[in-house]
Amino acid sequence: MGIFNKLLTAVRGGATEVGEAIVDSQAIRILEQEIRDSKKALHDAKTGLTSIMAEKMGVDRKVKDLTAKITEHEAYAMQAMEKGDENLALDIANKIAEFEHELTIQQGIRDGYDSKVASLKKMIRQSERNIQAMDREVSVVKTTAKVQKANDLASAKFSGSNSSLRSATESLERVKARQQQREDQAAAAMELHADENGDDLQARLKNAGIVDSGSSGSSILDRLKKQKEQS
Amino acid sequence: MSTEKLEQLMKGLAGKQLSDGVGLSIEMFDAENAVACIKVEDREEFPIYMTVDEGQILCISYLFGDEQVDPDKRAAMVEAMLMMNVSIPLSAFSKIGDQYIMFGALSPAASTDELLHEIELLSDNVLEAIEAISDYLKEAA
């Protein structure tokens, strides 16, 4: 069974066992057993991989030896031919043929080991991922149970009942209200800051004589008098 | 689940702020299962639970339980969640037991900044999602 199917079975099993917490459900216990089994299988596979790689190294050595021997004997055959000893050269060539035959066999064995190692490594990677996924599932389920317990405790502490505090929409409303309050506060603080700066500017303008500090009764009366004279 | 790696991540996040200067608090929630609880300032109602293993860093926020869903609108809600999943940045809907959740996953090699970005988006997404889904929920009592 594929890993997703297993997980689905576990969560479905948990969900259908009415009245029983999903953490204690049979499905989760089965999943935990499966994790233990998979970890054991993974350990075995890794041990298997190690011994196969050791065997492959032995074959690698044989291939290397044979290749060296062929090169060596080819040199001998050349030397024999240079000396005109055709018989010796033929004997050596026969030997080379034996070596080449053996080399073909050993190379075949090595290729077999190569593909075995590759498939074992792939299998190990896959089961590591599966174990991780199952581990995650079990841990996530267990965490959820703890979160729910913590939520219930918090609700009981705040409201005495667990209905109002846990409502998602009400929680959202509370968060939004707090955010609005924060924004309002920030806006008010900014306004206040601007006001203060404005006051400050007025005071400095007056001090500098740019804005007439007595610009009220008398100055307005003067202005009105001038207007009347002009009309 | 790796407690050591989780503690490293917690140390990295300690005292950090989100991009808009909002603070975070982080504490170990469940040492046995290596789960930390992250609370974004002013959004304490929707804490984010973080866990890490060799494969991924997982950040989960719990939205609501089955009991809050209007039974007549349940199928439509689930369909809406599935259809929303792709367009929600970095987060996705899911369900654990009878709890609907929103989660985001990161590479275990993710940097603290990437993790902060994930937390910020998840926190925003959770609020947006509940707003969008509230039509399918029972009227608050």
Image (cartoon, coloured by chain):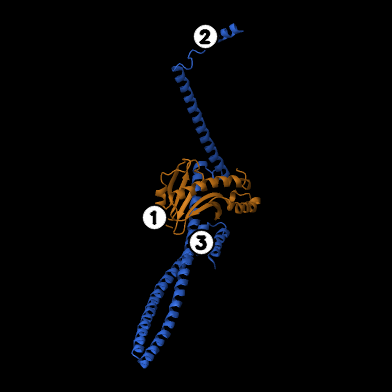
Q: Alpha-carbon neighbours of circle 1 within 10 Å: few (<14), some, or many (≥20)? A: few
Crowd tier of the residue under label 2, counting other residues whose Cα lies within 10 Å: few below 14, some 14–19, many 20 or above: few
The colour chain A appears in is blue
Question: In the rendering, which numbered label is found on residue A177?
Answer: none
Query: Which residue sits furthest top?
Result: A229
Q: Residue at x 48, y 28 (%)?
A: A193
Number of other residues with Cα within 10 Å of mark 3, as a class: few under 14, some 14 to 19, many 20 or more: many
Residue marked by disc 1: B4
Chain of the residue where label 2 is placed in the rendered structure: A
For the colour orange, the matching chain is B
Mark 1 → mark 2, Cα distance in angstroms = 80 Å
Mark in front: 1 vs 3:
1
Disc 3 and disc 2: Cα gap in Å? 91 Å
| Three-letter residue code for mark 3 | Ile
Q: Amino acid at mark 1?
A: Glu
For mark 2, what is the residue? A218
Q: Tell me the element at label 3.
A: helix
- Quick one: A54 or A223, which is closer to the camera? A223
Quickly name the residue at label 3.
A28
**Location of residue A107 with respect to A132 vertically, above or below:** below
Q: Position of residue A8 (x, y in %)?
A: 56, 62
Give a yes or no on whether discs 1 and 3 share a subunit: no
For the C terminus of chain A, the image quarter is: top right
Q: Residue at x 44, y 76 (%)?
A: A113
Image quadrant where one finds the N terminus of chain A: bottom right
